[in-house]
Image (tube, grey):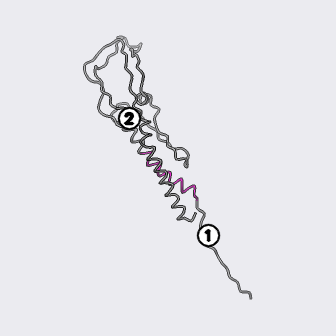
Amino acid sequence: MAVKVQLKANIPQPVDVTKIIAEERRKAVKVNQEGIRRDFKKTTRTWDHKVTFFVKTAPRLSGTIVAGTDDEIYNYVSGGTKAHAIRPKPTNKSGLLAFQANYKAKTIPRKLKSRKGGSSGPMVFRRAVKHPGTKARLYAETIAKKWQPKFAKAMERADIKAAARINKAGG
């Protein structure tokens, strides 16, 4: 009879590094997405016109958020407009524009908020008016400037957490 020794190695389960990194980055992205959406919504809080915003992420490891809206009116306000003439529609039988004499903008350039404002004063009737244009509010640029450093730090922290998890799991 032979003497034998049997040795068994304790081999850890393989670590899915990509999955761990993706999980930690997804958490960081979600928190930042919510903040970005809130900031966009602040800019229209007092508007009667309802705007729908999208906040999307690129593929799971890229760490990219894309946010905004396709709303035409919002884009006029955010991007501004040049001076232009306003005339009544051809279907307007009176041939006159009717509007209140005073107007206070509900938004301010580079401010992520919306306040009370709108038209007030006596009614005015004109055949045409020269609108001075709208100063660009630059919402997307302002939101990007605010969130870019926060997002970069959040992604860096996510990668550090992922590395710690991978190290703990023996990967």
Expressed as whole percent of the image width and height from the top left, the position of residue 165 reads 51, 61
Residue at (47% x, 48% y) in the render: 152
User: Label 2: few (<14), some or many (≥20) within 10 Å?
Assistant: some
Q: Is residue 139 left or right of residue 102?
A: right
Residue at 37% x, 16% y is 130
Element at label 2: loop
Q: Which residue is at the front of the view, 122 or 139? A: 139
On residue 110, which mark appears? 2
Residue occupying the point 38% across, 34% down:
110
Q: What type is the residue that disc 1 sits on?
A: Ile
Q: Looking at this rendering, what residue extends furthest in the bottom direction?
A: 1
Viewer-nearest residue: 134 or 118: 134
Q: Is residue 107 above or below residue 39?
A: above
| Prevalent SS, magenta region | helix
* Position of residue 153 measured from the top left corner of the image (x, y, whole percent): 46, 50
Quadrant (top left/top right/bottom left/bottom right) for the N terminus? bottom right
Q: Which residue is mark 1?
A: 11
> What is the span of residues highlighted in magenta in the rendered image?
16-34
**Residue 9 lies in what quarter of the image?**
bottom right
Mark 1 lies on a secondary structure that is: loop
Three-letter code, disc 2: Arg
